[in-house]
Image (cartoon, grey):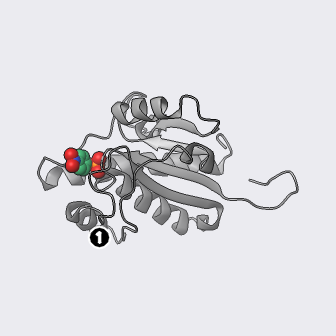
Amino acid sequence: MTDPSGARFRYRVLFVCLGNICRSPLAEGIFLHLAREAGLSERFHVDSAGTGAWHVGNPPDPRSREVAGKHGIELPGVARQVHPKDFDAFDLIVAMDRDNRRTLEKLRSGEEGRAEITLLREFDPESSDDAEVPDPYYGGPDGFDDVFEMVRRSCVRLLEELEEGRRG
Ligand code: 4NP
């Protein structure tokens, strides 16, 4: 991870869901936590955003904060909406479900940005490539435990792939 002059740069990862209060803040917090544990946090700039604007300015959903807290992870930030400049400001944009990915691809059409768009569970060793992180917003708290586990498994592999230089 060096630029042409040899200096270190930060690889920029944006996690995206619909509301930016449940799944993508969890993915952001988990990825950062794993990067810190691996001593790699300085190599990454990590953020999250929603394709919708309903929750802009709100903190993560209490159920996401609770499940993260059980694993010693604090969730940073307040919700924001994806912006066309994100396609230039990030190297990799990681969607939680196929709807998010479709919206991102539409938003990108005509933009110059070079960000790659992918699905988070493409990295889940326990799932097929097209699997989604289901929206837990209208379900019970168990949904958040399931989401936590699939996001964690996927982020472990994503971090490994970025570290090994298979991406970026
Ligand atoms: P998220 O979950 O996309 O994981 O943040 C949702 C949060 C809010 C809504 C939908 C999904 N909503 O319809 O308000």
CB of mark 1 near ligand 1 (< 8 Å): no
Q: Of the residues shown, which amino acid type is indicated by label 1?
A: Gly
Check the image and report above or below for 17 versus 6: above
Residue 146 appears anywhere in the view: no
Secondary structure of the residue carrying tag 1 is: helix
In the foreground, 156 or 23: 23
Q: Position of residue 107 (x, y in %)?
A: 47, 34
Decide if residue 43 is in sight here.
yes
Q: Please tell me which residue is depicted at 39% across the width and 27% down the height of the picture.
A: 130
Q: Residue at x 35, y 72 (%)?
A: 72
In the image, 125 versus 60, the foreground residue is 60
User: For mark 1, what is the residue?
Assistant: 69
Name the spot of residue 9 as percent of width and height, x first.
Answer: 72, 59
Q: Quadrant of residue 27?
A: bottom left
Q: Where is residue 82? Give x, y as percent.
A: 44, 47
Q: Residue 96 location, x and y as percent?
A: 37, 41
For residue 2, what is the image quadrant? bottom right
Question: What is the quadrant of the C terminus in the image?
Answer: top right
